[in-house]
Image (cartoon, rainbow, N blue to C red):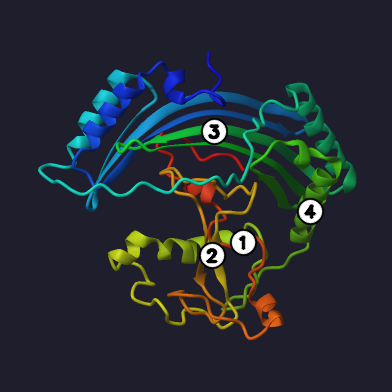
Amino acid sequence: MNNPATTSLLDRADLDRDAVRHEVARGLSGADDGELFLEYAQTEALMFDNGRLKQATYDTSQGFGLRAVKDDAVGYAHSSDVSLPALIRAADAVSAVRGGYTGTFAAPPAHTNVRLYSDENPLDAPGFENKVKLLAEIDAYVRDKDPRVRQVTVSLAATWQVVEILRPDGESYRDIRPLVRVNISVVAGQGDRQESGSKGYGGREGFARFIEAKAWREAADGAIREALVNLESVPAPAGEMDVVLGAGWPGVMLHEAVGHGLEGDFNRKQTSAFAGLMGQQVAAKGVTVVDDGTMAARRGSLSIDDEGTPTNRTVLIEHSGRLYAGPPERPADEHEADRQRPPPGLCPRADAAHDQHLHAGGQPRPG
């Protein structure tokens, strides 16, 4: 079998490139936009729970999706059978969305030489036995830390995804996306009360940096601390109160509250709460919201998205609380610029990996 890291997914499936381009062009003829998306992925997950290896899974998947856009309508067909007959059926299906419509096909996305992560396959190392030993070591470390620890769950998850995008105009794009995650969950108890804490981390690279003792001990200590703090917690009072969000996963709240509301389609159709508010103040002064998909090796970053478009850094709300509508406001001095700079990780793309449109019908990836 050809190595997908160095071989086109079309060649891996023994598909004739000219025949594939013919079917893509036929299926998307008259459409406004669209593409053929091919995917090959390997996924591995290990979970250590209650002092033993409870789950170990490995999966290899492949497939394609063909998309045709006609004004506001979208025709879509997908299959896990990467073959010419399957592609012919898909082209027949998506062409039905056009009816008698004839549009002007959109210009292709610009190519980029920027690579935010390597081609490294995180499933290759460390080996299975070493992964199991590491999970057992983390489990023992957490249990020895505090007698109130009652349950420990540790998991390692990795995926390696190869994608290719082909457009009817002849343009093609390719990306190889590694992704890993280490997660530690702790249940602590005192008397009849039990509380939990967890800590997870990862990124678009191999496991090496994340399984160093310093890294996993810091995560384990954080999960233990959270469980013990929760164990001493009291019920929150009723009513409104200020909430402080830290960097990292709390950014998902911004993503849901702000990021989705600023998506192009919602505003074009005037269905967003932000529709028509460009240039107006929508947040308190000093609030800056940035959607950044270009942070190297971060789990929410992509060199290109699933349509072949390079990701970028977009200011959504600038420091005055104004919904961005043009060139950024110039700070009065460098100290002001530092105050306006958003904290790392606080961006609405925080769970972009789960929001990706997985054309080939895949599940949200670990990380």
User: How far apart are labels 4 and 2 at the CA level?
Assistant: 23 Å
Which residue is depicted at the point 76% across and 54% down?
A: 227
- Mark 4 or mark 2: which is in front? 2
Q: Is residue 52 left or right of residue 6?
A: right
Quickly name the residue at label 2: 254
- Say if mark 1 contacts mark 3, CB within 8 Å: no
The amino acid type, in three-letter code, at marker 4 is: Gly
Quickly name the residue at label 4: 222
Label 1 environment density (alpha carbons within 10 Å; few <14, some 14–19, many ≥20): some
The secondary element bearing badge 4 is classed as helix
- Say if mark 3 contacts mark 4, CB within 8 Å: no
The secondary element bearing badge 3 is classed as strand
- Indicate which disc, 4 or 2, sits on the residue closer to the N terminus: 4
The amino acid type, in three-letter code, at marker 2 is: Leu
Compare residues 46 and 177 and report the one nearer the observer.
Answer: 177
Residue 58 percent across, percent down from the top left: 60, 24
The secondary element bearing badge 2 is classed as helix
Quickly name the residue at label 3: 161
Quickly name the residue at label 1: 250
User: How far apart are labels 1 and 2 at the CA level?
Assistant: 7 Å
User: How far apart are labels 3 and 4 at the CA level?
Assistant: 30 Å
Q: Is residue 73 left or right of residue 202?
A: left
Which residue is depicted at the point 34% across and 35% down?
A: 170
- Indicate which disc, 4 or 1, sits on the residue closer to the N terminus: 4
- Say if mark 1 contacts mark 2, CB within 8 Å: yes
Which residue is depicted at the point 67% across and 65% down?
A: 246
Residue 9 vs 348, above or below: the answer is above
Compare residues 294 and 144 and report the one nearer the observer.
Answer: 294
